[in-house]
Amino acid sequence: MFSSTVSSDGVIVLRPLRADDVTSMYDAVCESLAELKPWMSWAHDNYQKRETRDWITLAQARWNEGSYYGFAITEAQTQTFLGGLSLSQIHPLYHFCNLGYWIRSTQRGHGYAGRATRLAARFAFERLKLIRVEIVVAVENEASQKVADKIGAHREGILHNRMVVGARVHDAVMYSLLPSDFGLAVRL
């Protein structure tokens, strides 16, 4: 496992989730529940600190397996926990993955999600040798669509019945990022 910074742009740091993130991540989730619940299946009214601890433990194990990469997004100078990001559903044959992100409520509007998304996509292309990163966003999730649009992700279309969050089925907007968006060649 990478034990420190995976990437930084001088404003934020993207790094693997650590056991000492439990309290700061839990606090960020609790502060952000109203914004997270409609889009994240794991966010619910009775969210418990043990769920954060269990998730971080699972994310660390999957990182070591190379099947899932869970990141903390922190502010570069203060190391304040800003949110989370993951590279998931990594397809070993077709070399693509899904990228998801969230920023704590009090830190929204500063461009952190876009910065983190671009750093994570570059990680996927350079370190994981993927050829495509997909961002799948519920049609109603305008905030996440703004992030994808702002960073120049390719808006590819609407996927019907693509997401289930809780008991709701959502159509989703498919976005993609490609190595060429970063001046990189495809490397398998």
Image (tube, rainbow, N blue to C red):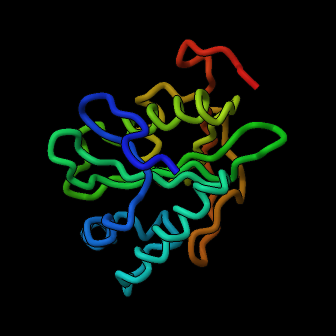
Which residue occupies the foreground of this view, 129 or 173? 129
Where does the image place residue 168, in percent across and percent down from the top left?
60, 72
Which residue shows up at 57% across the image and 76% down it?
Answer: 166
Q: Which residue lies furthest to the bottom in this view?
A: 46
Image: 127 above or below 39: above
Which residue shows up at 75% across the image and 37% down it?
Answer: 95
Where does the image place residue 187, in percent across and percent down from the top left?
71, 21
Image: 48 above or below 93: below
Which residue shows up at 40% across the image and 55% down it?
Answer: 84
Which residue occupies the foreground of this view, 51 or 145? 51
Count how many numbered circles sit on residues in the image. Answer: 0
- The part of the image, by quadrant, that contains residue 125 is top right
Where does the image place residue 99, in percent across and percent down from the top left?
56, 46
Where does the image place residue 59, in percent across and percent down from the top left?
53, 63
Q: Can residue 177 be seen in this view?
A: no
- The part of the image, by quadrant, that contains residue 155 is top right
Image: 29 above or below 122: below
Horizontal side of residue 176 vs 47, given as left or right: right
Which residue shows up at 25% across the image and 29% down it?
Answer: 10
Q: Quadrant of the C terminus?
A: top right
Q: Can residue 185 be seen in this view?
A: yes
Q: Residue furthest right?
A: 93
